[in-house]
Amino acid sequence: MSERRATAKQKRQVAERAKHCCEYCKSQLRFSPQPFCIEHIYPFVLGGKTKLDNLALACAGCNSHKHSKIEAIDPLTNESTPLFHPRSQMWNEHFCWNEGYTDILGITPTGRASVLALKLNRPALQNLRKILFEAGQHPPN
Ligand SMILES: [Zn+2]
């Protein structure tokens, strides 16, 4: 049986692999007042393992909105669809930025469902993205 908590080494590896950005909303840890979480992509409570290929770096907001969800409704089709999986899917294939880089747009069923379920355009994130964009610090590379 796998431990729920990631080891210090796993935490370091996950954060470095994610370039210290939330793997869902792309928030940068260095501009976050709250610590980020090591998140089980396939939830631990559903049997997900504490292994690098099931772990992602997530900001506190995305982590709490995702909770133990693995799928959500695509607002375009009203069909249930798997949430974005940062290990097996590419962010750029499911999401893009709006013109001002304040909003994440879902461009696939998974992208659209994830934007809604994880609330990837929370007002505080939009405000922060606007300021960071003007300062040349957003979006992250
Ligand atoms: Zn996030």
Image (tube, rainbow, N blue to C red):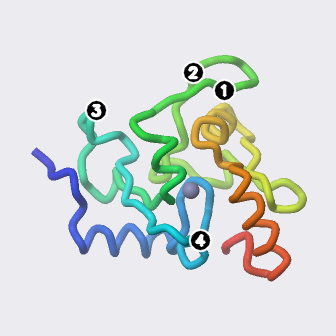
Relative vertical location of residue 65 with respect to residue 31 in this rendering, above or below: above
- Quarter of the image with the N terminus in it: top left
Alpha carbons under labels 4 and 1: distance apart = 27 Å
The front one of 26 and 130 is 130
Q: Residue at the spot x=31%, y=59% of the render?
A: 52
Q: Residue at the spot x=24%, y=46% of the render?
A: 49
Q: Residues within 10 Å of mark 4 (few under 14, many from 20)?
A: many
SS for dot 3:
helix
- Disc 2: which residue: 80
- Disc 4: which residue: 28
Q: Report if the CB atoms under discs 3 and 4 are less than 8 Å apart.
A: no
Q: Report if the CB atoms under discs 3 and 1 are less than 8 Å apart.
A: no
Mark nearer the N terminus (3 vs 4): 4
Relative vertical location of residue 9 with respect to residue 64 in this rendering, above or below: below
Q: Report if the CB atoms under discs 1 and 2 are less than 8 Å apart.
A: yes
Relative vertical location of residue 77 with respect to residue 4 in this rendering, above or below: above
- Disc 3: which residue: 46
Residue type at mark 1: give it: Asp
Alpha carbons under labels 1 and 2: distance apart = 6 Å
- Disc 1: which residue: 74
